[in-house]
Structure formats: structure tokens, C-alpha cells
Image (cartoon, rainbow, N blue to C red):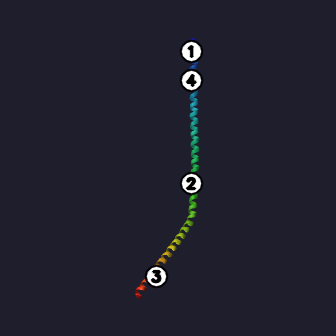
Amino acid sequence: MSYLNQIDSSYRTELRELNELNYARFDAKLEQRVAELRSDLRSEFNAGMAALDTKIEQRVAELRAEFRQGLPELRADLRTEFIQRLAATETKMIRWMFVFWAGSTLTMLALFSG
């Protein structure tokens, strides 16, 4: 019976060693696959960021072009509006000046004639 126990014990030891060896291989493969996955994810992330960076640069260039194209029109519109408001202000000032001069002239005429 002790012979059978020795055989059983040796089989158990061999089985344990075989399981540990298989686990070590599995762990090494798992680590390798995780490293490959990380590498793939990093490369995809970097490629995505590069594409996003390119799109942003392109959109900024388009916006700059639109701004530069619309700037002369905006300046012309602002200049026209400024001139119109200045003319309206001049007209109001001239009206008030005429009212003041007419009132002053009438007052002086009334003083000198009376």
C-alpha cells in the first residue's frame, strides 16, 4: 500500500509541476497579448490624435481664410455705418446751432430795437 501511496504522491507532484509550468506559459502568453493590445491601442490612439490634429489645423486654416475674406467687407460695412452716423450727428448739430443762432439773433434784434 505504501508503494501505491508513493506512486500517487509522485503523480501528484508531477501534476502540480505540470500545472505550474502550464500556468507560467499561460501567464507569459497573457502578458504578451496584453503588451500587444496596449501597443495596438497606443498606435490607434496616436493615429486618431494625429488625424484629429490635422482636422483641427485644417479647420483653423479655413476659418482664417474666411475671416480674411470677410474682413474687407466688414470694414466697408463699418465705415459706411460710421459715416452715416456721423452725418446724422452733423445734421442734428447744425439744426441745434441754427436754433441757437436764430434765437440769439432775434433776442439781439429785440434788444436793439427796443
Kindly identify which residue carries mark 3.
102
Give how far across and how far down residue 102 sits, in percent: 46, 82
**Residue type of the residue flagged with mark 2:** Glu
**Residue type of the residue flagged with mark 4:** Glu
Gap between marks 2 and 3 measured at Cα: 65 Å
Residue sitting at 57 percent across and 64 percent down? Answer: 70
Name the one closer to the observer, 61 or 78.
78
Gap between marks 3 and 4 measured at Cα: 120 Å
| Circle 4 or circle 2, nearest the eye | 2
Residue sitting at 57 percent across and 18 percent down? Answer: 10
Disc 3 crowd, CA 10 A, few/some/many (<14, 14-19, 20+): few
Residue sitting at 57 percent across and 14 percent down? Answer: 5
Above or below, 104 relative to 4: below
Gap between marks 3 and 1 measured at Cα: 134 Å
Q: Farthest residue toward the bottom?
A: 113
Kindly identify which residue carries mark 4.
17
Above or below, 102 relative to 5: below
Q: Farthest residue toward the top?
A: 1
